[in-house]
Amino acid sequence: MAVYKHNISFWEQQSLLQLQYDVIVVGAGISGLSTAIQLLTHDDTLKVLILEKLPIGAGASSRNAGFACIGSISELESDLKNYGFDHTINTVRRRINGLRVLLDQLGEHEIGYEHKSGCEVFEDKLSFEANAARIPFWNEALEDYTYTKATFKKSNQNSMKFHFSSIENCAEGLLDTGKMYARLYNKAISLGAKILNSCNVANYEEVNEYIVLNLSNFEDSFRCKHLVLCSNAFSNSLVENLNLTPCRNQILVTSPIDKHPLNHGYHFDSGYIYFRAIGDRILIGGARNYFSEEDNQEHFGLNRDNIDYLKRFLSERILPGVDYRIDACWSGVLSGGIDRTPIVKYLSDRVLIGVRLGGMGVAIGSSIGQELAEMLIRKLND
């Protein structure tokens, strides 16, 4: 069956959409929208277009669980072992800075941000005690970034109804993902950015002083002087050898539950499983490390084994004996790789990339956008 391709009309070109821009951003997630916002805040005369392959949002930006994503103590211990101290501290610093940029840019109240401590929960005593013994080390290491001498502490909540020991993270917080994404999207538009959804960039090429972008669903090509790639988990189709691995996470939200036991954001199994309250509902997600998915994880979809596991975790460990139903179920696609450091660099004199957010896009997406915009502004000012 032939694929329909859109031709831009004369009227569209006159009043709605041009084919040539100063900057085109690929990806309307947190980092892409933040890049456009930072650019237009600096210079509102720039013509900026954002192209997004999905009808709403992006891989994980509008589909995440709403954690601030500072990191649990066992996750930091794992990063320390695998990547070293400097890498781990720089990663945390980038997350904290990114969260501040996001909150300053959008407003805490406007995105439903609550500075609620996070709790990492453990089901075995040895694991809890080993991580608890590292609290003094991490508190000293993070003091200059979290502005407190007690980033981590043993939780006083020994009365948790799911009977885990826990370590509290005072730097963590929760937000409303829908409000956050809508505010980012609307702010970019209010500053003058054009956003086209359901536009898949098939490829791009540099031709003289312009970059030409070919879309799989447009007959016409777009041109720009500068290109910024922020498509995160979907970037392998545009750039080779990125060392970027798409990872698909499953998320469930329950029906309203009377007097549920959760009052924090929670992490379990080094952050692979996470759960939180949304009003009188409970959200739970993750557990992808227990399942080997052979299908393409760049594609959205539901892994039934993964979902069944999350349901059992809910019923057996969080809500034993409680009747509830699942009211929402979806997947989000994040990106990882051998190295957890985000890729933020020039691919050529006119092409920038900011990807591989490692599942921490809420925390670092805004700072990635800020970095990309600052790099491009310096180029524009040369």
Image: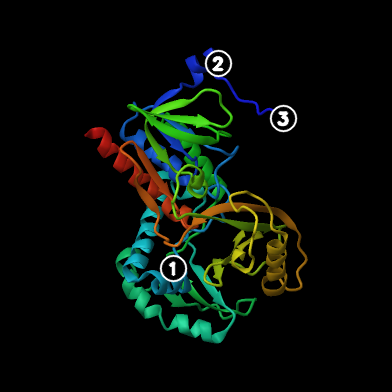
Residue plotted at (40% across, 39% down): 228
Where does label 3 land, which residue? 1
Q: Which residue is mark 2?
A: 9
Mark 2 neighbour density, 10 Å: few (under 14) some (14–19) many (20 or more): few
State the residue in front, 271 or 80: 80
The numbered mark, 3 or 1, whose residue comes first in the sequence reads 3
- Residue at the image point whose x is 68% and y is 27% from the top: 2
Element under disc 2 = loop
* Residue picked out by circle 1: 170
Q: Amino acid at mark 2?
A: Ser
Element carrying mark 3: loop
Q: Amino acid at mark 3?
A: Met
Say if 110 sits above or below 261 in the image: above
Task: State how many labels appear.
Answer: 3
Label 2 to label 1: alpha-carbon separation: 54 Å
> Are dots 3 and 2 in contact, CB under 8 Å?
no
Instruction: Say which element carries label 1.
Output: loop
Q: Nearer the viewer, mark 3 or mark 2?
A: 3
Give the label, 2 or 1, closer to the camera: 2
Q: For marks 3 and 1, give the one nearer the viewer.
A: 3
Residue type at the position of mark 1 = Cys
Give the percent coordinates (x, y) of residue 259: 68, 66
State how far apart marks 3 and 1 are (Cα).
55 Å
Percent position (x, y) of residue 80? 39, 72
User: Where is residue 200 shown, x and y percent of the image?
Assistant: 55, 36
Alpha carbon of mark 3 to alpha carbon of mark 2: how far?
Answer: 24 Å
